[in-house]
Amino acid sequence: MARLNGKIAMITGGAAGIGAGVVRMFAAEGARVAIADIDAAAGKALAAELGERGIFSPLDVTSEGDWQRAIAQVEEAFGPLDILVQSAGISRPAHIEAASLDEWRAHMSVHGEGAFLGCKYAIQSMKKAGAGSIVNISSVESIRPGPLFVCYGAAKAAQDAITKTVALHCGEQGYNIRCNSVHPAATYTPLLEQYLKSAPDPAGLEAIYAGMQPLNRIATVEEVAHAVLFLASDDASFMTGHQMYVDGGVLAKPYPKGEGA
């Protein structure tokens, strides 16, 4: 289909989960892709799978120096950046009484500072290209957080605020750089598998997650990646500051008492 033919993209958290799904879909659509991640083994393996369309860029999203080096590497290999997808993230469930300050700071650092730094340095590169699209992978938890996601929900809400301010700034400056967010509900990723494996009744918890969506199932990585592809592509050329829900309808209904965890 080549919807991204000739585009240069960087995907943070690109070695696994939603990020890896986006990497594969973007490459199939004609983009050259930098897989930015702290997992060098998985990142290099995926880059090898893509051949000349992919490179691995070591990146800790909380490190300003890493961002500068990673984007410089992409520019040297492919040219100025057209697309940034920020998919790197952590999620360690805890309610307010159990969560520690260290966990709070870790979530804020990855999702808040990471999104800030990514947008800051991506814009510099995209200005050289004359246009660009930033897609931040947020969550339904930024809009309707459950009691076990005090750190994660707040950090994703901070990321949402960055998304909107970047969209407004780039529009006001006439940069032709768009910034949007995608908000998945439960999706089959390594993070979800982590929750399921640690549960006393994995099958029961999986059924609970599926039942929280009106579509009564858990999303696939590919379903989320299709939404990211749309926002990243020129098909969404008049969309910026937008929150796209890929949630099976979960935000369209209230949580019954006892759900929302």
Image (spheres, rainbow, N blue to C red):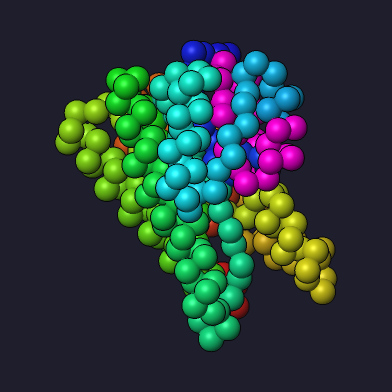
Residue 192 to residue 2: above or below: below
Q: Residue at x 36, y 28 (%)?
A: 125
Quarter of the figure that contains the C terminus: bottom right
Q: Is residue 134 rendered to the left or right of residue 93? A: left
Residue 113 picture location, percent across and down = 41, 55
User: Which of 213/108 is in front?
Assistant: 108
Observer able to see residue 72: yes
Residues in magenta, as a range:
17-45
- Asked if 145 appears above or below 64 in the picture, the reply is below
Tell me, yes or no, whether the highlighted magenta stretch contains residue 44. yes
Whole-percent x, y for residue 110 in the image: 50, 56
Residue 66: image location, x then y, percent: 49, 43
- Decide: is 235 above or below 183: above
Q: Is residue 245 magenta?
A: no
Q: How many marks?
A: 0
Q: Quadrant of the N terminus?
A: top right
Q: Quadrant of residue 27?
A: top right
Q: Residue at x 58, y 58 (%)?
A: 90
Q: Nearer the viewer, residue 50 or 17?
A: 50
Q: Is 99 left or right of 51, judged from the image as shown?
A: left
Q: Is residue 74 left or right of residue 162?
A: right
146 sits to left or right of 167: right
